Image (cartoon, helix red, strand yellow):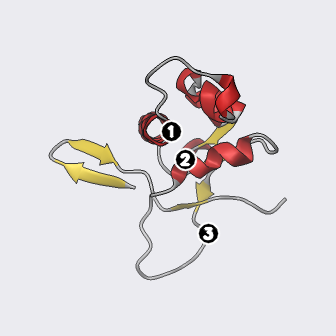
Amino acid sequence: KGLKRGNNTVWKPRPGIHALLRLRCQYRLGIFSSAMLHNVQQALSQVLRTIKASCSEELDLSGPQDQSKGIPEHLVSVQHLTVEQLFQVVLGRPHCIPDPTTRPDKNEWDTVKPLAG
């Protein structure tokens, strides 16, 4: 979620976002946002920083790793993870279509995600 601070947006990922790492082992993860792609990339960079910090705190990854401790491999390698490796599909506003509804409060820039088809 983006919070406006002057001309800057501060992205604050939802609590527990690091749980996505468990899904990464069995699924391809993706993001579909109606935001512009440069804003999506900024948000995803913050998501990745948050995930790395959370895993470092949880597993104390600050020192040398001892695989005999039973630390899951997908958590040990998180410090070298890139946004592209975590989210293999990133879709943004260019992948959306203009909102076809006729709501009275609709703006000309409103879009929807074409999920059917």
Residue 100 tag number: 3
Query: Total label count?
Result: 3
List the single residue furthest toward the top. 64
Residue 108 tag number: none
Image quadrant in which you'd find residue 68 = top right
Closest to the observer, 52 or 33: 52
Amino acid under label 2?
A: His
Which circle, 3 or 2, is nearer the viewer? 2
Determine the secondary structure under disc 3. loop
The residue depicted at 62 percent of the width and 52 percent of the height is: 96
Q: Can I make out residue 50 in this image? A: yes
Amino acid under label 1?
A: Cys
Local crowd at mark 3 within 10 Å, few (<14), some, or many (≥20)?
A: few
Determine the secondary structure under disc 2. helix
The answer to whether the residues at label 1 and label 2 have Cβ atoms under 8 Å apart is yes
**Does 117 sit above or below residue 58?**
below
Give the Cα distance between marks 1 and 2: 7 Å
Local crowd at mark 1 within 10 Å, few (<14), some, or many (≥20)?
A: some
Closest to the observer, 75 or 50: 75
Amino acid under label 3?
A: Pro
Name the spot of residue 110 as percent of width and height, x first.
Answer: 48, 62
The residue depicted at 40 percent of the width and 78 percent of the height is: 105
Question: For mark 2, what is the residue?
Answer: 18
**Does 18 sit above or below residue 82?**
below
Question: For mark 1, what is the residue?
Answer: 55
Closest to the observer, 77 or 64: 64
Give the Cα distance between marks 3 and 1: 42 Å
Image quadrant in which you'd find residue 81 = top right
